[in-house]
Amino acid sequence: MCGLFGVYGHPEAANITYLGLHALQHRGQESAGIVCSDGQRLYAHKTMGLVQAGFSSADLAALPGQLAIGHVRYSTAGQSHLRNAQPFAVDYQLGSLALAHNGNLTNHEDLRAQLEQRGSIFQTGADTEAIVHLIAISDKPTLIGRIADALRQVEGAYSLLLMDEQSIVAVRDPHGFRPLCLGVFPDGAYVVASEPVAFDLIGAELLRDIEPGEMVVIDAQGLRSSRPFDSAPRRMCLFEYVYFARPDSTLGGASVYEVRRRCGARLWDEHPIDGATREDTIVVPVPDSGVPASIGLAQHAGLPFEMGLIRSHYVGRTFIEPAQSIRHFGVKLKLNPNRGVLEGKRVLVVDDSIVRGTTSRKLIGMLRGGGAREVHVRIASPPVAWPCFYGIDTPTRSELIASSHTIDEIRRYLAADSVGYLSLDGLTDAVYGIEGRDRELPRDSYCHACFSGEYPVPVRPPHPRQLRLVNA
C-alpha cells in the first residue's frame, strides 16, 4: 500500500499535492506528509492520521515552491509513529534530499546490518531509510547516479519519488510490483501518482504508466527517462486490482472497475447456486470493495442486486487499521444489516477477498441476524494462502485462514451455507481480457504470490528484528 504524489512546475505545488494525497487516502490512513522546495531549500510537514485533518491552511501556506512530493502511509509491520511518516527529508553531501516509498525491500535486514557496520545510524524502523543511506554513501558524482547506484543494491518492491531542491525523480522497480503513473497539466506542469484518480481531482491528464525499471527525471530541462537497471520479468501485483486500487483507476491499461465486474461474472460461472431465482435470491455486496464484482455477478446471473449491508461513510477501511482490536470493532461500526432487504432471502454475499476470516465471519452473522434464510459467500479472488513480502500486511502464514484450512473448513468457520472463490485463471482472465489492452503483455506478467506461493523475488529468512520494523 502507501500512496505517492508529486508535482513539478506548479505555483501551488503544496496545495496540489494535498489534493492528490486526498485522492489517494484509500492507500494509507496512518500518516501523511508533504515536502516541497522553493528552489533553494526543502520544507516539510508530516502528521499522523488523515490528510484532511493533518493539514491546515496555515500548514500549506508554510510550504512554498513549485515542486513537491507527498506520501500517505500504510505500515506492514510495527507501530505507527510520526518518526516513520514519510517523505523522509535529510541533508547530505550534495545538499538536501526527500524520499517517499511504496513497497517493501526483501533484503532490508542485510542492507541495514551492512550499513550499521559502516557507521550509519538509523533514525526509524522503516526499510525506506536504507535507501537514503545508500544514496548518501554512494561515490557517484550526481544525484541521479547515486539513486541508480543505491537501487541496484536493493531487492523487492519499490515505487519511489525523490526530490532535491530543483528536481523530482520517479522510479519503479524492475518488476513493477507497485503502480506509478505520469500526468501533465494543461500548462505543462508534470505530476506523478500511485494511481491516475489523483489526476482527475486536480485537472491533470494521464500520460502513461511509468514502466517497470524506468527512472523519470523532471527538472528545468524538462522530462527525461532512462532504464538504469537490469531487465526483469514484469510482475505487477494482482491484488491491486482485487482490493487496493480505487475502482475508478486504470492500472497497467486495465480499468479496475471493469476487472472487478468481470471477476464477479466469472464467479457465477465457476460457483453458481442451484435453484436460484429472482424471487428468492439476492446478490449483496460487502461495501465498498465488493460492489463492482457483485454488480457483474448479478448482471451475469440475472439476479437482483441489493444493498443488504449499509456502510457508515465515517469509518475508514478496516483492513488497513494497524490494531487487531480496532479491526474487529470496526466491522460493526462500519456496516449494518438492511433487514427489509434480507428478510427470508437466500443471500449471495460477494466480497473481494478473505484474509484472516474474522471479518467475514462477523458479516455472515450480521446477515443471518438481519433475517437472511441462507448465506452463500462468493469471493472475487483466489484464496489468500501465502504472505506478501512486497508491501501487504500479511507477514505470516499463520494469519491467513486459507493457508491452513480447506474450503469446507472455511465454510464451517464462517457459518456459511457455501463458499466459492474465484480461480487464479479467472482473475488473470479478468485483468488480461479488457478490450484495448496491449496484447503483447504475457499472461504471466503479474505477481500472484499471495495466491500461489510463487515469489518473483527470493524471500530471505526472517530476522528477529523484522518483527518490529515499520515498512512503507
Image: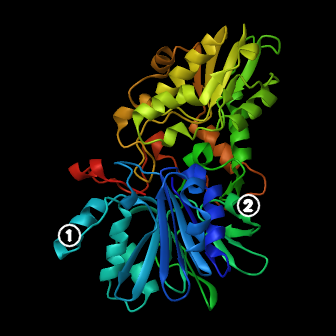
From the viewer's perspective, tell me whether residue 125 is left or right of residue 361: left
Query: In front: 41, or 77?
Result: 41
Residue at figure coordinates x 74%, y 69% from the top left: 204
Query: Within 10 angstroms of label 2, few (less than 14), some, or many (20 or more) residues?
Result: few
Query: In front: 52, or 397?
Result: 52
How far is mark 2 from mark 1, CA to CA?
A: 43 Å
> Which residue is label 1 attached to?
116
Q: Secondary structure at mark 1?
A: helix
Between label 2 and label 1, give the one nearer the viewer. Answer: 2
Mark yes or no: residue 311 visible: yes
Find residue 145 and report its horizontal and vertical position in percent.
43, 85
The quarter of the image holding the C terminus is: bottom left
Q: Is residue 40 above or below residue 12?
A: below
Name the N-terminal-most of marks 2 and 1: 1
From the viewer's perspective, tell me whether residue 253 is left or right of residue 400: right
Find residue 240 and report its horizontal and vertical position in percent.
58, 49
Identity, as a three-letter code, of the amino acid under mark 1? Glu
* Label at residue 201: 2
Residue at figure coordinates x 38%, y 77% from the top left: 90
From the viewer's perspective, tell me whether residue 358 is left or right of residue 442: left
Residue that protrudes farthest toward the front in the picture? 58
Identity, as a three-letter code, of the amino acid under mark 2? Leu
- In which image quadrant can residue 334 be found? top right
